[in-house]
Image (cartoon, coloured by chain):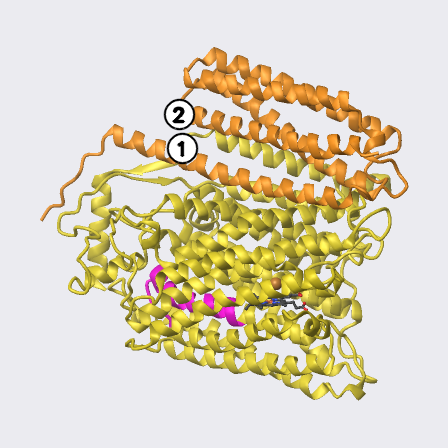
Amino acid sequence: MEPTLAVSSKALRRQEVEEGQSKILFGFWIYIMTDCVLFASLFATYAVLHNNTFGGPSGAQLFSLPYVLAETMLLLTSSFSCGLATIALQNKSKAKVIGYFFLTFLLGLGFLALELREFRHLVLIHDSWTRSGFLSSYFTLVGTHGLHITIGLIWMAVMMIRVLKGGLGTYNVRRLKMLAIFWHFLDVIWIFIFTIVYLLGALRV
Amino acid sequence: MYFANFWLGKLSIHQLPTNRITQGGAIMMVLIVLAILAYVTYVKKWRYLWNEWITTMDAKKIGIMYIIVAIAMLLRGGSDAALLRLQQATSVGASHGVLPASTFQQIFSAHGTIMIFFVGMGLMFGVINLILPVMLGSRDVAFPFLNSVSFWLFAGGMVLVNLSLVIGQFSNAGWLAYPPLSELRFSPSVGVDYWIWSLQIAGVGSLMSGINFISTILKNRAQGMTLMKMPMFAWSVLGSMSLVVFAFPILTVTLALLALDRTMGTHFFTAGGGGNMMMYVNLIWAWGHPEVYILVLPAFGVFSEVVPTFSRKRLFGYTSMVLAIWAIVLLSFTVWLHHFFTMGAGANVNAFFGIMTMVIAIPTGVKIFNWLFTMYQGRIRLKTPMYWFLGFVVIFTIGGMAGVLMSVPPVDFQLHNSLFLVAHFHMMIVGGVLFGLFSGLIYWLPKVLGFRLNERLGRYSFWFWLVGFLTAFTPLYVLGLMGATRRLDHYSAATGWQPLFILAGFGVVLIGIGLGLQILQLIYSILTRHALMDTTGDPWDGRTLEWSVPSPIPFYNYAILPTVSSKDPFWAKKHPTEQPALEIVQDNQPAYKDIVLPKNSGLGVLIAGFAFLFAFAMVWHIIWLDIVGVLGVIITLIIRSTDEHTEYTIPAQEVAELDRNYRLERAEV
Ligand code: HEM
Ligand SMILES: [Cu+2]
């Protein structure tokens, strides 16, 4: 008896591709969760060490809230423009997607520049990570966030080129969605850093 | 000089081993590796290796590679154990045994590290890869490429640990490298760095596997397989991988902080500078306790498949099993402090963690009882997988009771860091994890190899393992109660410990014979495979989906993806009167469809290769190579993600033909 051959249509294949893409998105959410745990561990370290200044300066002496507020505004605005890019993505408007992501990129770059400038300042006045347990945990927590931002920026650059060349196909849309999730996630982490490290640190006398 | 420092970092010819034992080990290892390379070249199999194995995306093959690495590491870790036992049996009074203290320390550190990370984790991921996708009625894991990267990172970590034997040295600080001993000030050599970076890359690999298997279980199940119809093995893996996802990032952070202390001069765990070494101990156990359950849950899962099959009964208490798994998962994160009651956190804190530790024994007990009730009134067949199960019940119960004893803080103050503790965790990890995974290997290898393993040799090896294990570890309880602490390289004759140490050493010899018999079993079974051929695909009268496909499993797993509607779908199909009949496949009228499979890719091994270079350069402080490693990883990732044609399609026509041939071939054997 001859087996019947079900004709496989293009539609079926497209459905499979879409399922695959949604699976990747799902996996990406789990990755974000693991990154949350990673930051949670760093926050815990900071919480344990934040008073161990070992004769060095405390957060209240080092942090300038207006400066950090500027950083925060840059990052929040970048998150907003990233949101606008997502809306443009839904409307399949390639030019807008690239435009808003470019804006996001610039704002993120600005944030990173400010952060590095602050780090440089601390190192120059000899309050680097080697000074005390407090500063070790401060640099590591904030620096890890900065490292994530850097990775996000590289990713964004690659994606802009890719959209320019390849347009908004299924694959690129999924990748942009992942990038947007990543970027918002970093924003949320920064809110915690702003509150726990800078606000509480600067308010403590 | 500066030039050499730039290119080679801390590497130099003086880093080659100077001590006899290490030299012997290093030379032997190099010879084995060279012999393998020469053999592959001689039989001209490089292309085959590259195409069929190194670049493969097939979970079954990746599983086999995990298992091969794990078995090699079991031999390495086992030799370490034999040396440790030899030292402790002989180094008493005037005699100082065979090993210098520093070598002894490196060996026990390497032993623990290798056994947990490369044997336990390796066998676990091996068995999961081998069978989980098939069991779920799926063609592969959710992310095959990620799977390949995970494996090669694991292999990279393995190479790094072993490299420390040849160049430089390994850590002297134990398998968990507590500071301040593991800080640069007290461990200035590269040993601890080898430990850190080997675990770091292997650990990231495990983390990615965790994400992969969770997605596989939640997204790749056969149609109709609701969560509560999943095989219990899948539930166990889901529990274990959830622990991976929550615990491994903590390990990543802990290792990174220790590395920062050692290379950048931070003060996380240092004795001065405002560091806090007890924070390290807390962090490492916040990962470490979940880790022991990460290892043991999949082994539990194996037993939940093996026991029903060989009792010809449904698993007793399916729902309570699921609940027990999730209770264990949650409670795992609430007991870590029992590893350092002596820290002095105060009576209330200790009482809390003591009670939580006792509580976690309850779901574990539930599972044991459920297996026993599954056997009750079953038609039991005592095949080798069942032997390992029965051995497990005995050993695991004894070890578990020892654990509950230590969960009482005042008792633990006496037993902490004694050989009593060592006996406890070996009973859990060897008796639980290894026995479980051995059982699983014998049970599932026929699915992958196409033939069963020799039963008689399997039984012999089991008995040697069981008796050897009890001989090797029961004396340690007594020694612990007599006051022997762990990691002693020398003791006074007046303690009266030597006879027990000698007995324990004899036990290791028996285990060694058991291990030898297992390898013999494998080789002998391969040689006599024609007599052991599995022509039906269902050698044990199994219950779950994996037994419905032919052995060896075709590379596409299922010609037609199955649909299920009960817990033991294959059993239900074979016994339509017992349970409502359910269709798996309509054999007489197969409706073949195109199959889409991932293409092989060498980029997985490339990414792991760059990660390995990075790790190696971190150990030896070779900055340019670090940069090469990082850039390599990033660029390879970008290249990979640019490729949108990572899959290929087998047209339905061809699937039909493949399937027909497969059936014919099997029918002829
Ligand atoms: C039945 C539940 C269990 C209880 C009540 C329990 C209890 C304990 C306690 C109190 C300790 C700390 C003792 C000390 O350091 O003084 C300990 C250590 C340990 N347990 Fe368990 N345990 C249980 C299950 C397990 C399982 C299932 C495994 C492995 C699969 C395991 C592996 C270990 C390891 C590896 C150590 C210590 C390693 C080290 O210090 O280097 N335990 N256990
Ligand atoms: Cu524990």
Tell if the residue under mark 1 belongs to the same chain as the one under mark 2.
Answer: yes
Q: Nearer the viewer, residue B218 or B541?
A: B218
The letter of the orange chain is: A
Which range of residues does the magenta coloring cover? Answer: B431-453
Quick check: is B267 in the magenta stretch?
Answer: no
Mark 2 residue type: Thr
- Chain to which mark 1 belongs: A
Quarter location, residue B420: bottom right
For the C terminus of chain A, the quadrant is top right
From where the camera sits, is residue B29 visible?
no
Which one is earlier in the sequence, the residue at label 1 or at label 2?
A: 1
Q: Chain of mark 2?
A: A
Q: Colour of chain B?
A: yellow
Which numbered tag is attached to residue B26?
none
Residue type at mark 1? Gln
What secondary structure is the stretch in magenta mostly built from? Answer: helix
Secondary-structure class at tag 2: helix
- Residue A63 position, x and y percent, is 80, 28
Give the residue at mark 2: A170
